Amino acid sequence: MNFTKFNSAAKKTKSFTVREMFMRQLLQLKGISVDKAMAITNVYPTPKTLTHAFKNEDDNLLANIPLGTSKSRIGPVISRNLSQFYSRPSFN
């Protein structure tokens, strides 16, 4: 195998969906676990849908979203933080 074939075979070429990239973005925020990110993206699969939902609802929009099969919920603090993050027109 020559270097060109090896190099093309070894490239990471996976394309991510918007939902997958949104989940990765959520995971960078404090307090967001994989379970919470998955629960949020199951209801709001893109940042645009979440932003639009926060414009029409209050800060507790995400508070009662269940986490998988457990009885846990996302909670009001994380919901409020995400509301502030995704509702601001700009960051100073």
Image (spheres, grey):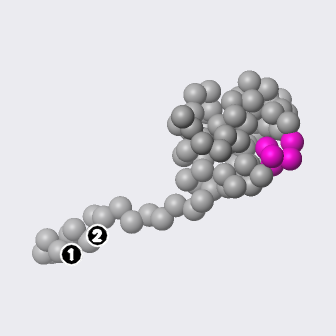
Residue under pointer 1: 5
Residue at (60% x, 50% y) in the render? 22
Q: Nearer the viewer, residue 62 or 3?
A: 62
Would you say 11 lies left or right of 55 here?
A: left
Q: Nearer the viewer, residue 39 or 69?
A: 39
Residue under pointer 2: 9
**SS of the residue at dot 2?**
helix
Residue at (28% x, 70% y) in the render? 9
**SS of the residue at dot 1?**
helix
Identity, as a three-letter code, of the amino acid under mark 1: Lys
Residue 50: x and y in percent read 74, 49
Above or below, comparing residue 31 to residue 87 in the picture: above
**Magenta stretch encompasses residue 23:** no
- The answer to whether any part of residue 36 appears in the image is no
Above or below, comparing residue 82 to residue 1 in the picture: above
Q: Nearer the viewer, residue 15 or 6?
A: 15
Residue 79: x and y in percent read 75, 32
Would you say 28 lies left or right of 37 here?
A: left
Structural crowding at the residue carrying mark 2, measured as other residues with C-alpha within 10 Å and reported as few (<14), some (14–19) or many (≥20): few
Identity, as a three-letter code, of the amino acid under mark 2: Ala
**Residue range corresponding to the magenta coloring:** 53-57
Structural crowding at the residue carrying mark 1, measured as other residues with C-alpha within 10 Å and reported as few (<14), some (14–19) or many (≥20): few
